[in-house]
Every structure is written in C-alpha cells, then in structure tokens.
Image (tube, helix red, strand yellow):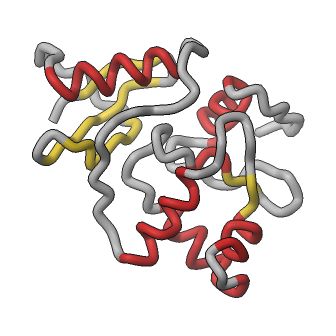
C-alpha cells in the first residue's frame, strides 16, 4: 500500500478497482513506489487542498462499512468547505436525534480522512472533539478552511 507525504504528515492510501477505500495518517515512512494513476491523483488533489487551491475533491470513493456508517459518511461529505456542524445536528439531520453516540462512532470509523471531512464535526459546545488523525491535525484542517479555532489543545 502506498504511503505519501503531505504537509500534515504521511498518509496511507488503499485502492480497490481504481476507487479510494482508505486514506489514513500513518507514522510509517513514505513508500518508494512511484506515484501513478489514482495514487498520483489522490496526492495531487490532497496537495491542492492543503495548499488552499482546492475546496472540493473529485475522486471515486468506495466507502466500506455498514449502511448506517455509509449514511453518516454521506451526510459528513455534504458539509461544505469552511463550515462545521455538531454530532447532535448531524444525528438530527439523519432523523435520529438519540443516535449521537452511534453517529460519533461512525465518524470515528471514517476510512477516508480529509476527503470525507469528519474534521468538520465539532462538539455541541463548539469544542474540538476526537479525530482519528489527532486534534492538532483537526485544528489545522479547520484553520486551513478558514474556521476560527479559538481553543487551546493543551
């Protein structure tokens, strides 16, 4: 599996039949594989996004999960660049206000970080909450999108 370098750290890419199935931060070193095809396109679009030149990704995704997880990830994917929502509002949007914890668990299982923008989900009190890539990266992504983050992480 290829590992690429980004300004926020190395990322592991997994593809299945030309569709992105996994994009995660990793501490593993960049792989020596030459970038071609879809891996090259994923890196290109991530680099554009992280440099402020791209707001929307245009990549074929194959999200693997339960129907509920997929519905949560689809709702997350509809949150526009530079905007946030809360776990509570997302569960309400999905028609199940009592499912806040299940929504949070589905977001935590998001296999395609950054591109499926789970970093745009914040706590009801406006605080940054968990992120599989780490809160520092979540804050950096939100600031990149122009969302003022005013909390200290430490």
Q: Note whether 31 is above or below 75 in the view shown.
A: above
Specify whether 134 is left or right of 65.
Answer: right
Residue 117 x %, y %: 55, 45
Q: Note whether 13 is above or below 17 in the view shown.
A: above
Instruction: State which quadrant residue 143 falls in.
Output: top right
Instruction: State which quadrant residue 11 falls in.
Output: top left
Front residue of this view, candidates 17 and 113: 17
Residue in the picture at 74% in, 47% down:
84
Residue in the picture at 53% in, 51% down:
77
Residue 124 x %, y %: 83, 63
Instruction: State which quadrant residue 85 falls in.
Output: bottom right
Screen quadrant of the C terminus: top right
Screen quadrant of the N terminus: top left
Residue 151 x %, y %: 86, 39
Residue 57 x %, y %: 45, 32
Residue in the picture at 26% in, 43% down:
20
């Amino acid at each position: 599996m290829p590992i690429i370098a980004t300004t926020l750290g190395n990322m592991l890419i997994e593809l299945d039949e030309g569709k992105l199935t996994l994009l995660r931060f990793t501490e593993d070193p960049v792989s020596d594989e030459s970038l071609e095809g879809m891996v090259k396109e994923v890196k290109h679009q991530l680099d554009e996004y992280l440099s402020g030149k791209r707001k929307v990704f245009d990549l074929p995704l194959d999200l693997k999960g339960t129907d509920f997880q997929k519905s949560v990830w689809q709702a997350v994917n509809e949150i526009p660049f530079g905007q946030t929502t809360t776990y509570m509002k997302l569960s309400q949007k999905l028609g199940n206000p009592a499912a806040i914890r299940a929504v949070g668990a589905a977001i935590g299982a998001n296999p395609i970080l950054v591109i499926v923008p789970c970093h745009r989900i914040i706590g009801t009190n406006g605080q940054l909450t968990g992120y599989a890539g780490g809160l520092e990266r979540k804050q950096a992504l939100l600031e990149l999108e122009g969302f003022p983050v005013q909390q200290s992480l430490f």
